[in-house]
Structure formats: C-alpha cells, structure tokens
Amino acid sequence: QVQLVESGGGLVQAGGSLRLSCAASGSIFSTNAMGWYRQAPGKQRELVARITNGGITNYADSVQGRFIISRDNAKTAVYLQINSLKPEDTAVYYCAGLSSSWGTYSPILWGQGTQVTVSS
C-alpha cells in the first residue's frame, strides 16, 4: 500500500523557519514527481512546490526564494524548507505524489496534511 506521511508542522512566529518532511512508502517515490500543496481556511488547495524524480524544481511565485523543496531518494522522503514565514503562509500543508502527462502534473496520492500556523 502506498502511503505519504507528513510531519514537521507547528506554530512559529513570523520570520521563522520550519522544515516539513514527507515519508513515502511504496513505488510512487521512485517513478513520480512529488509536490507540496497547501490549503488555507476558506481557500482552494494550491501547489507550493514540485520536484521531479530527476530533481528539477518549480515553485509558486508567492514562495519563490523562501521555500526549498528537496528529495532524498535513498530515504524515499521529500522535504520542504520554509523560511521567512509570513502569517499568510498559515495553512495545512499536504505532500502529494504526482503523475505527469505532456508536461502537466496532477496529484494522484495525498498525505494527511500537517498544520503550519504563523503568528504575527
């Protein structure tokens, strides 16, 4: 059974940092791109960062320069380093396994989410 399990969320002051982790089990990690999404209260879930199995990364404009996505293929884990946190970064953060077709990526597997709360 393929699973994604996130950890590392918490309450942090504005300007602080967090590192989110996602442990992946099953075959999805070795063949798929992975992504981090977030969903704030009353808002749609949005892609924050994506990394292919070859290590190519993409970021949402709102987090470019502050967030860093990485993956450890040996540990089948993907990470999101979040720096210079802002109150508007408050959301539930989800790890996702992605399928790709003709350059378009779509989530096919979700973790349970981890809450990040940023106080001003």
Image (tube, rainbow, N blue to C red):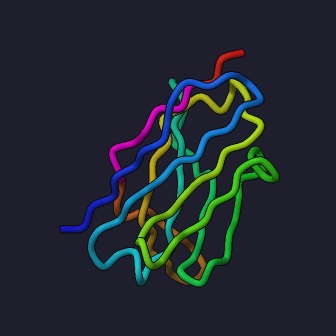
Residue at image coords 54%, 58%: 79
Count of all numbered marks drawn on residues in the image: 0
Q: Position of residue 106 (x, y in %)?
A: 47, 66
Q: Quadrant of the N terminus?
A: bottom left
In the rendered view, tell whether residue 61 sits above or below residue 100.
above
Residue at image coords 69%, 24%: 87
In the picture provided, is 109 more to the left or to the right than 42?
left
Q: Of all residues shown, which one is farthest toward the top?
A: 120
In the picture provided, is 34 more to the left or to the right than 19?
left
In the rendered view, tell whether residue 93 sits above or below residue 26.
above
Q: Does the stretch in magenta take in 114?
A: yes
Q: Quadrant of residue 70?
A: bottom right
In the picture provided, is 96 more to the left or to the right than 3?
right
Residue at image coords 71%, 58%: 59
Nearer to me, 112 or 68: 68
Q: Position of residue 117 (x, y in %)?
A: 56, 25
In the picture provided, is 64 more to the left or to the right than 82?
right
The magenta stretch is 111-117
Q: Quadrant of the C terminus?
A: top right
Q: Position of residue 16 (x, y in %)?
A: 71, 32
Q: Position of residue 62 (x, y in %)?
A: 76, 44
In the rendered view, tell whether residue 13 sits above or below residue 37.
above
Residue at image coords 59%, 53%: 80
Q: Quadrant of residue 76?
A: bottom left
Q: Does the stretch in magenta take in 54?
A: no
Q: Of all residues shown, which one is farthest toward the front?
A: 74
